Amino acid sequence: MKYKLGIDVGGTFTDFILVSESGETSIHKTLSTPEDPSMGVLSGIHDLAEIINSDLGEFVRSIETIVHGTTVATNALLTLKGAKTALITTKGFRDALEMRRGIREEQYNNHYRNVAPLVPRYLRLTVDERIDAQGKIITALDESKLTPLIEFLKEEEVEAVAVCFMNAFKNRIHEEKTVQILKTHLPSCFITSSTEVLPSIRFYDRVSTTAVNAYIGPVVANYLDNLTKKLDDVKFKGVLLIMQSNGGVVTPEVVKKSPAATVLSGPAAAPTAGVFYANLLGYKNCITVDMGGTSFDASLVIDNQCITGTEGSINRHKISLPSLDIATIGAGGGSIGWIDSGGLLHMGPQSAGALPGPICYNKGGTLPTCTDANLILGYLNPDFFAGGRIKLNVEQTRHLLAEQIASKLDLSLPEAAAGMFRIINTNMAQGVRQVSVERGYDPREFLIIVAGGAGPIHAGEICKELEVPMFVVPNVASIFCAAGMLLGDLKHDYIQSYMVSFSQIDRSDFLNIYEQMKETGVETLINEGVDKDSIDFYPVLDIRYLGQYHEVQLSVPWDDVLSCDLDKIQKAFHSEHNRLFGYSLEEEGTAVELINVRLRVVGKTEKPDFLSQSRSEEGSHRVETKDHISLKEALKERRKVYIPECNEFKEVAVYDGDIPLSGNTITGPAVIERVNTSIFVSESYDCLIDDYGTFIIYNKEVFPDGFKTNNDEPG
């Protein structure tokens, strides 16, 4: 038996999904080990061997592929625990990293302070060299002047060096020479240059991205070395792939060169999984939402393509590499409820985290959270939280929530909990608007796919606020990102600045740039074991009207690039500009200029068939095929829960969601309990469970005759 294994290392839990070649699926969660995340990974692999009743050595040898998402890079930036980093740049530009673009992030905040740069000023060194905007050498690099800089870096015991020269994207000769010399004299240092990471215009974007790459480089490399060594120790001989921020996967060797490409490694897998589940129901457009313990992530999928942007930042540090457009807000199960000086109730962004956690966890938490409110409202079973492994303290929760929220607002305890519930739902609805309405898309036209341990409780109210008639909760909702990792393709992104008016584009130069990118991408993927016939190309052009500061990223068919159909591309730009901003300047005849050309080269991977035979039931156990069970057999109890539509408690049916319920329709209001999540079906909704164990929750008024699906013929 051969297996594929998806692993998502989070802040609290490390998630695993194991899929056999026949489609049998096992799901497992283990506590993360922040001091060395690779320890948690190996611990989970040991657990999985026991779950499937296999010898560890035999089990590891049977794993063909491990796809791994990690928060190592993100955490290094968030906690500022990266490497001691130096920057070598052009004379006169030492402070560009700290000056940023000269634009205040909070224009009207008199107390605003700029973020401290990752490289302190005394480690920002300069070289007297200069290349002009056309790539011509104005001042040649004097290599002898690097010697005192290298001696200084040795004295300071620097661990990483970023090299970023002015206009290097037009001519990289000075950066290449500098990197070569640095690697010779500083063999133990992580050395990176802007032309390796981001060869494009805008100096601050380049220098910031390069500094981030250097800052996290040794940390990521050390983690990957530890992980590969531990896998070698248990005789793993398969393929290890790492999830990138762009939703694709690459080998560890590629990540070590460009670790900044993994800063959103974990959340980036959610849209990929969203495409899969949307297609099962015949949808090409979807919005994935993932509500965990601390944050709420929302992302958009259009025509089966995950939306990508290049304006990302982590902890206010700019990273201009392609990454999935994911809106993250501080709204999770641990989000703390608090009252401001004006007497208004807020939820988050502060979080109780895993420790001390919500009050009900009984681990020392004293501040009321979203999870505490959900317990008071009846959505959580105090004796079945995490499958009964965690007993929730109801009395302590009632006491502290009443003392800190209800009494101060002159409300009853249920009213206060309901208020917390409504506010956090509104916050999350706004998060969905960030990736849809603010991008020119109507969320009512999308399928909402809900993930995370807390998401299925709140999704109904979020959808009502957005006027979305239906949402689905996948059978692997609690380990959604880990599942998405097994569905990712190998992806490499390339960029080259090419600033020119459309009327002056040299078709030969244009095609040559793309041909070089294509050759590089194809060669890289073939070296990674991808068949040439399994490679696709996705060009993107950064275009703007003459005089504009920001450009529009326009996806272009590969055939239009090969034919160099510039008129068609211009018309597409006018249309996209109008969709995004409500106007275009086509009739005025305003000149259009090209800024950057981009190419994503994708190597298709073989996808696991993990839903073909049976549902994937959650919990730390192996999935076995079972006969379908009737709702009467699945009924666990009846209990009172809060119904938002009528603002009161009602006694509702509670069903066991960890048994095969395919083909059944559950009438709302009801609660469906699973080991790692609970689903609240409010009074406005009914829930159909399809052939794959997916919970399809739809509005009764919009679908008065029920929702029909044919999983055998999606689309």
Image (tube, helix red, strand yellow):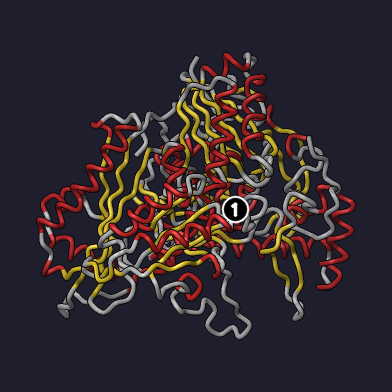
Quadrant of the rendered image containing residue 580 = bottom left
In this rendering, is residue 675 above or below 247?
above
**Label 1 crowd (10 A; few <14 / some 14-19 / many >=20):** some
Q: Is residue 666 left or right of residue 339?
A: left
- Name the residue rendered at 62%, 25% in the picture: 629
**Where's the C terminus, which quadrant?**
top left
Which structural element holds mark 1? Answer: helix
Up/down of 214 relative to 634, above or below: below
Q: Residue at x 50, y 46 (%)?
A: 265
Q: Is residue 460 visible?
A: no
Q: How far across and how far down the image is residue 32, in percent?
A: 67, 40
Residue placed most toward the observer, 166 or 326:
166
**In the image: residue 563, left or right of residue 355:** left
Q: Nearer the viewer, residue 22 or 644?
A: 22
Task: Give the percent coordinates (x, y) of residue 401.
Answer: 83, 61
Residue drawn at (44%, 63%), measured in percent from left and top?
Answer: 88
Q: Nearer the viewer, residue 463 or 288?
A: 288
Please give the residue where the numbered disc 1 appears in the rendered image.
76
Residue 577, how many percent across, how many down?
28, 69
Look at the image and tell me whether residue 32 can be seen. Answer: yes
Q: Which amino acid, by three-letter code, is at mark 1?
A: Ala
Residue 398 point in image, percent of width and height:
86, 56
Q: Total of numbered circles in the picture? A: 1
Q: Is residue 528 above or below residue 159?
A: above
